[in-house]
Image: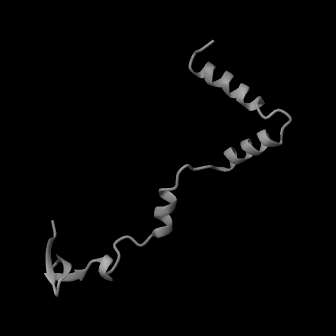
Amino acid sequence: MPRTGRSKGKPTIKTDGTNEKLALLGGVKTVTQREAIEEANRWPVFGDEECEAVNAALRGKNVYASTAEFEKEFGAYHGAT
């Protein structure tokens, strides 16, 4: 575990005998892949398949037709009759 110290009132971390500023105070950031982190934490994730299914339901004559189909498939998957 790194030891912490203070230099002129600012927190520092001692690693390998050197002092580094915390990123919060202008030091080098440890994690620099902002876009990758944002993408990994994005929720919920919708793909093309989900978007196409919603568009098909909204453009169809019966908006609830896909709901009835889902209920049948869901019931069959769980062994309901």
State the residue lying farthest toward the top: 81
Q: How is the image coloured?
A: one colour
Residue drawn at the location 53% of the way across and 51% of the way down = 43
Residue drawn at the location 34% of the way across and 72% of the way down = 30
Vertical side of 80 occupied by 74: above or below: below
Residue drawn at the location 78% of the way across and 35% of the way down = 63
Q: Is residue 38 left or right of residue 63?
A: left
State the residue lying farthest toward the right: 61
State the residue lying farthest toward the front: 9
Give residue 6's quadrant in the image. bottom left
Vertical side of 19 occupied by 45: above or below: above
Q: Residue 64: x and y, percent? A: 76, 31
Q: Is residue 69 left or right of residue 9?
A: right
Vertical side of 66 occupied by 52: above or below: below
Q: Residue 66: x and y, percent? A: 74, 31
Q: Is residue 27 left or right of residue 79?
A: left
Give residue 20's quadrant in the image. bottom left
How many discs mark residues in the rendered view? 0
The C terminus sits in image quarter:
top right
The N terminus sits in image quarter:
bottom left
Residue 17 visible in the shown view: no
Q: Residue 25: x and y, percent? A: 30, 81
Q: Is residue 5 left or right of residue 60?
A: left
Q: Residue 42: x and y, percent? A: 52, 55
Residue 59 visible in the shown view: yes
Residue drawn at the location 33% of the way across and 80% of the way down = 28
